[in-house]
Amino acid sequence: MLYPIPKKIQLAPSQAKWQLSSAESVVVLVGLQNLRMQKGIEESELMANLIQISNKAKALDIPIVDLYGDDLIQGMQQLGEYASTHPQLIFAGQVTPMLKQILPHLLSVTDQIVVVDDAILLANQEQHIQWVENISGQGVHHLNTYSLTRLWDLSAPSEYVLSAKGIMLAVAEQLEMDALEIDPYIDLRNYGLNSVAVVSLVGVWRAHGANIRYEDVLHYPSLHELAGFILQSSR
């Protein structure tokens, strides 16, 4: 039985002082196989947040490591390989005994560890709140999905965000589609691109220096036209 995710006001404030950067992040998803077996998980806020984090990571080319029981050793080896170039470890998923055990060891490798506090699952809400308080006292950073994805957007390299690949993956993220499924010459509204998604995309592109307005996305409705306009406007 899933419990309500604690609100921000219920959680101890994070004590971390370092700045999150998408170029130095690696996402570590823990116990997703077990999570997917939970009753009601597919319609939950928890799963929505996990999907949002995964989609944003893919859009910004942030590596994702999946730690699960059957292939834990391989996952840990992969995490170790990334740690030298991506010292910011972003954890989400099920808070397993294994995760509690390895966190102190990881803190000896890097002090830049984040737990996404509305994208984790423990036994109940009380344990959830207590665990976040405990890790905060150990210097582990914690924040919610919205703050994480917003900081990633703002810290991403502009040359990537405004590249053909970055534009394509950002649009795919908003459509919740694989980028290869999008026909570059079809009106993106046919795929379900709505006004909320357009506002979000325009905000990110403008933050990175593109001279683009909401109306421009409507005027250049296909991925091919839109990417061409953005690449031209940002030169």
Image (tube, helix red, strand yellow):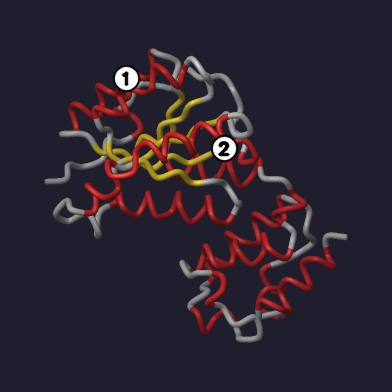
For label 2, the residue is 25
For label 1, the residue is 133
Instruction: Give the image location of residue 190, x and y in percent.
Output: 52, 84
Instruction: Give the image location of residue 62, x and y in percent.
Output: 57, 47
Q: In which quadrant of the rendered image does the C terminus lie?
A: bottom right
Q: Amino acid at mark 1?
A: Glu
What residue is at 52 percent from the left and 77 percent from the top?
A: 181
Q: Quadrant of residue 104?
A: top left
Q: Secondary structure at mark 1?
A: helix
168 is higher (above) or lower (below) than 89: below
Q: Residues within 10 Å of mark 1 (few under 14, many from 20)?
A: some
Instruction: Give the image location of residue 34, x and y in percent.
Output: 22, 47
Look at discs 1 and 2 and give the one toward the viewer.
2
The residue sitting at the left extreme is: 1
Give whichever of 80, 22 is nearer the camera: 80
Q: Quadrant of residue 4?
A: top left
What residue is at 44 percent from the left and 33 percent from the top?
A: 143
Give whichever of 193, 84 is nearer the camera: 84
- Residue 164, label in figure: none
What residue is at 57 percent from the left and 37 percent from the top?
A: 25
Mark 1 or 2 closer to N-term? 2
Instruction: Give the image location of residue 17, x and y in percent.
Output: 56, 19
Whole-number angstrom distance, CA of label 1 to CA of label 2:
23 Å
What residue is at 52 percent from the left and 65 percent from the top?
A: 174
Q: Residues within 10 Å of mark 2 (few under 14, many from 20)?
A: many
Question: How many labels sit on residues?
Answer: 2
